[in-house]
Amino acid sequence: MNSRDTFLKELRGQSIGSVTSQSTAEESFQNEVLRPILKLQNDLFIASFINYIKENKVDFNSKTVEAKLAVIDNTVQKDIKFRNEMKGIIIGLFTTEEYKFYTKNASNINKRIKNMLLERLKSQVQLFDN
């Protein structure tokens, strides 16, 4: 393993969630790779979404909580540019082997990334108010 891969694995820390012999390869990837990266990059996701709100002039503060959650949902689901930016923040912390696995399973892993990112942003909706 090269020094970059070693550094990345040490930076991310331990897997989050259980990985058993019954876990699929994608479940294992989610718990061993995606969850630690999303946790590590959380502050950047928050800053990116706050920037998105400002750039797109979304009147976020005056909305109800339900409407705020709908804005988050709509942004992650439909704004391809924003979603690709978030994926880049995650994929940039893959090791070479993890990237190879990702390219073979990109469709399913992208769905997992999208769902995990949605939940992460929605659970921190209070941080987006000025």
Image (tube, rainbow, N blue to C red):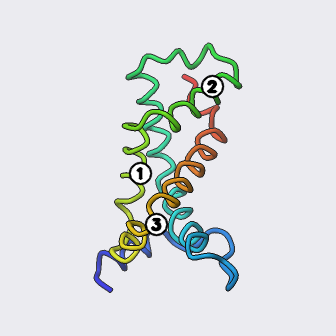
Q: Residue at x 38, y 66 (%)?
A: 103
Question: Which of marks 1 and 2 precedes in the sequence?
Answer: 2
Of label 2 and label 3, which has the lower sequence position? 2
**Residue carrying label 1:** 87
Q: Residue at x 47, y 68 (%)?
A: 12
The vertical placement of 62 against 37, above or below, is above
Q: Secondary structure at mark 2?
A: helix
Task: Identify the amino acid type marked 1.
Answer: Lys
115 left or right of 86 in image? right
Give 26 or 62, whichever is nearer the viewer. Answer: 26
**Quadrant of the drawing holding the N terminus:** bottom left
Q: On the image, which quarter does residue 7 sit in?
A: bottom left
The image position of residue 112, as x and y in percent, is: 56, 56
Camera-side mark, 2 or 3: 3
Mark closer to the observer (1, 3): 3
40 or 73, nearer to the observer: 73
